[in-house]
Amino acid sequence: PITNKKTLVVFLPQLGEFDSFEYCEQLHAAQPALQSNGIDLKLVGIGDATSAQRFCSFTGIDIRSLSLDPTARLYQDLELYPGPAFSLPNRDI
């Protein structure tokens, strides 16, 4: 049967990135309103299990709402911004 249930899917850049933290704090605060309107929240972020745990701990987001893309492959396939790409200096020099 068709339901009126909706899902808000949010693609975040890297989980350690400041804007992701700030945005998800606002989403967490809005979750009661989303739920009362029949909207599930699903997040996709670039990172690993450790960064996901820290991210959810800091923002209050339920870890079950978060899917990980550790290699940013989905972001590349969808031509989305994967967040900052820093390169570290070569320490062998």
Image (cartoon, helix red, strand yellow):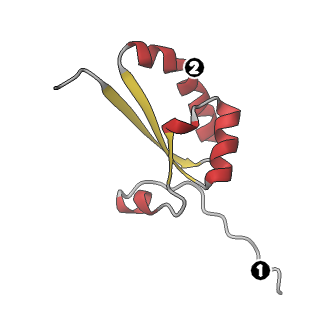
Q: Secondary structure at mark 2?
A: helix
Quarter containing the C terminus:
bottom right
Q: Nearer the viewer, residue 58 or 5?
A: 5
Mark on residue 38?
A: none
User: How busy is the neighbourhood of tag 2: few (under 14 within 10 Å), some, or many (20 plus)?
Assistant: few
Which residue type carries mark 1? Asn
All told, the count of numbered labels is 2
Q: How far across and down, in percent of the image, does residue 43 sit?
A: 48, 40
Residue at point 35%, 31% (across, down): 7
Q: How far across and down, in percent of the image, does residue 30 sit?
A: 51, 19
Residue at point 44%, 30% (across, down): 41
Residue at point 76%, 75% (across, down): 89
Mark on residue 29?
A: 2
Tell me if residue 41 comes above or below residue 68 in the rendering.
above
**On the rendered structure, is 26 left or right of 36?**
right
Residue at the far front: name it. Answer: 1
Q: How far across and down, in percent of the image, does residue 55 sit?
A: 66, 41
